[in-house]
Amino acid sequence: MARPRQFDAAAALAAAQDTFLDKGYQATSTRELTQAMGLTQPSLYNAFGDKRSLFLLALDDYLNQSLRARITRAESNHPPAQALVAFFAESVERALGDPRHRGCMLINASLDASSDDPALRQVVADELEALRAFFERTVRAAQAAGTIDPSHVPEDVAANLLAVQVGLRVLSRVMPERTLLEAMVRQALRMLDLVP
């Protein structure tokens, strides 16, 4: 009796993530995934489900290692106003640090999500809402600490910062220029009297 093929699930998931980052969800074929992951199609389905299930697992893993970890790090290691400064400084460095300029998997997914998959769109929307909520809660905390003017409406500031973050990550794919990305962040933070 043949033994089932053994493989490193974490490495396979990382390979899938890399492929989705390169090509996007819609443009990535199952064949490309199996080649990148070193799996047969039945093994992929047995281990991860269909392409959509695999994408959601890869996106969740990506977010745990990147966006969610960055939010936790910013909130844990900095006073509220400086958490915003640190978050955006890291965003610029991450955007410029990818030599392939692939962008952020979440932002790419938001641009790639099709109207015929409302569940996937909702997953992406929920994650973007979590980012917006981080901005709002950080602004409120900074206002309570006296480091951001209380005249700013936290919901409005959070919406603006979300737009800056999304725009930064989109532009970084085609215009990965430090001066441009830093100017976007600088202007957003200056509105709050924060110095990047």
Image (cartoon, helix red, strand yellow):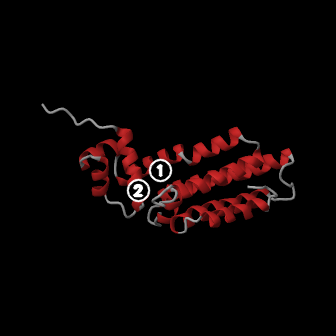
Answer with left or right where residue 95 lies relative to residue 186: left
Under circle 1, the secondary element is: helix
Closer to the camera in the image, 56 or 96: 96
Closer to the camera in the image, 108 or 48: 108
Who comes first in sequence, dot 1 or dot 2? 2
Q: Quadrant of the N terminus?
A: top left
The residue sitting at the left extreme is: 1
Q: Quadrant of the C terminus?
A: bottom right
Under circle 2, the secondary element is: helix
Amino acid type indicated by mark 1? Leu
Residue 74 screen position, x and y as percent: 67, 44
Amino acid type indicated by mark 2? Phe
How many numbered marks are there? 2
Depicted 184 relative to depicted 122: above or below: below
Q: Residue at x 64, y 41 (%)?
A: 73
Q: Quadrant of residue 3?
A: top left
**Cβ atoms at labels 1 and 2 below 8 Å apart:** yes
Instruction: Report, in whole angstroms, how far the alpha carbon at label 1 lies from the one at label 2.
Output: 9 Å
Q: Which mark is residue 116?
A: none
Depicted 77 relative to depicted 91: above or below: above
Closer to the camera in the image, 116 or 33: 33
- Which residue in the structure is indicated by mark 1? 59
Residue 60 screen position, x and y as percent: 49, 46
- Which residue in the structure is indicated by mark 2? 20
Residue 178 screen position, x and y as percent: 61, 62
Residue 145 screen position, x and y as percent: 84, 44
Q: Quadrant of residue 22?
A: bottom left
Q: Residue at x 61, y 45 (%)?
A: 70
Q: Residue at x 84, y 49 (%)?
A: 147
Q: Is residue 25 visible?
A: no
